[in-house]
Amino acid sequence: MSTIKVKVNGKLVEAKVTGNMRLLDLVRDTLHLTATKEGCSIGECGACTVIMDGNAVCSCLVLAGQCDEAEITTLEGLNDNPLTQKLQAAFVEKGGVQCGFCTPGVLVSTTALLSKHPQPSDEQLKDALEGNICRCTGYQPIIDSVHHALES
C-alpha cells in the first residue's frame, strides 16, 4: 500500500493505493466518479477514457501508482467546460449519442483532441476516436456532431 497525491478534476486528492489498483478503480470506486465506465478492461473500447496530464488515456491500463503528481480530468471535471457543453448539445442534436455507454469516453477523447487542435482534420478526429468503440452510431453521427459543435 502506498500513498499518492493526484489532482483530479482540479482538486488535490491524497489516496492510498495498492500496487495493482488501476486508475479506473481509483476514479470509480474510491472517488465515486462514475461517468468513467469499465467496458473491456484491456484498453480496447475507450469507455474508461480520462485525460491524464493533457492526454486521453484508457484508465484501465494505467496503474493508480503511476498517477502520483499527475493531473486527471474525468467527464465530471468537464461539466463546466464550454467546449464539452457544445459537444454534448451537438451529440444530442446530430444523433452522436444513442445507447450512451461509449459517450463519456468519446466526449473526453474529443475534448482532449480539441484542446490541442481546435480545428482538427477529419483524419485527426478519426485518429483521436480510434480507441473508442461505438456499436450504435456507425461513427459518422459522432463525427458530424463534432463538426456541428465546431461550427456553432
Image: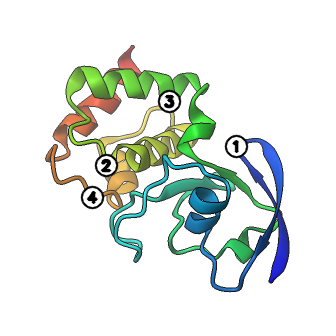
Residue type (three-letter) at the residue carrying disc 3: Thr
Q: Is residue 6 left or right of residue 101?
A: right
Residue type (three-letter) at the residue carrying disc 1: Asn
Residue type (three-letter) at the residue carrying disc 2: Phe
Mark 4–mark 3 distance (CA, rounded to whole Å): 19 Å
Is the residue under label 4 in contact with that under label 1 (CB below 8 Å)? no
Residue matched to label 3:
84
Q: Quadrant of residue 4?
A: bottom right
> Which quadrant would the N terminus be assigned to in this image?
bottom right
Q: Nearer the viewer, mark 3 or mark 2?
A: 2
* Disc 4 crowd, CA 10 A, few/some/many (<14, 14-19, 20+): many
* Disc 3 crowd, CA 10 A, few/some/many (<14, 14-19, 20+): many
> Which quadrant would the C terminus be assigned to in this image?
top left
Q: Is residue 29 left or right of residue 128?
A: right
Mark 3–mark 2 distance (CA, rounded to whole Å): 17 Å
Q: Nearer the viewer, mark 1 or mark 4?
A: 1
Instruction: Say which label, 4 or 2, has the lower sequence index.
Output: 2
- In percent of width and height, residue 12 lies at 84, 50
Residue matched to label 4:
133
State the residue in front, 138 or 12. 12
Q: Nearer the viewer, mark 4 or mark 2?
A: 2
The secondary structure type at the circle numbered 3 is: helix
| 97 lies above or below 28 | above
Residue matched to label 1:
9
Instruction: Say which label, 3 or 2, has the lower sequence index.
Output: 3
Mark 1–mark 2 distance (CA, rounded to whole Å): 21 Å
Residue type (three-letter) at the residue carrying disc 4: Ile
Q: Tell me the number on the disc at residue 101.
A: 2
Q: Is residue 47 left or right of residue 12?
A: left
* Disc 2 crowd, CA 10 A, few/some/many (<14, 14-19, 20+): some
- In percent of width and height, residue 90 lies at 33, 23
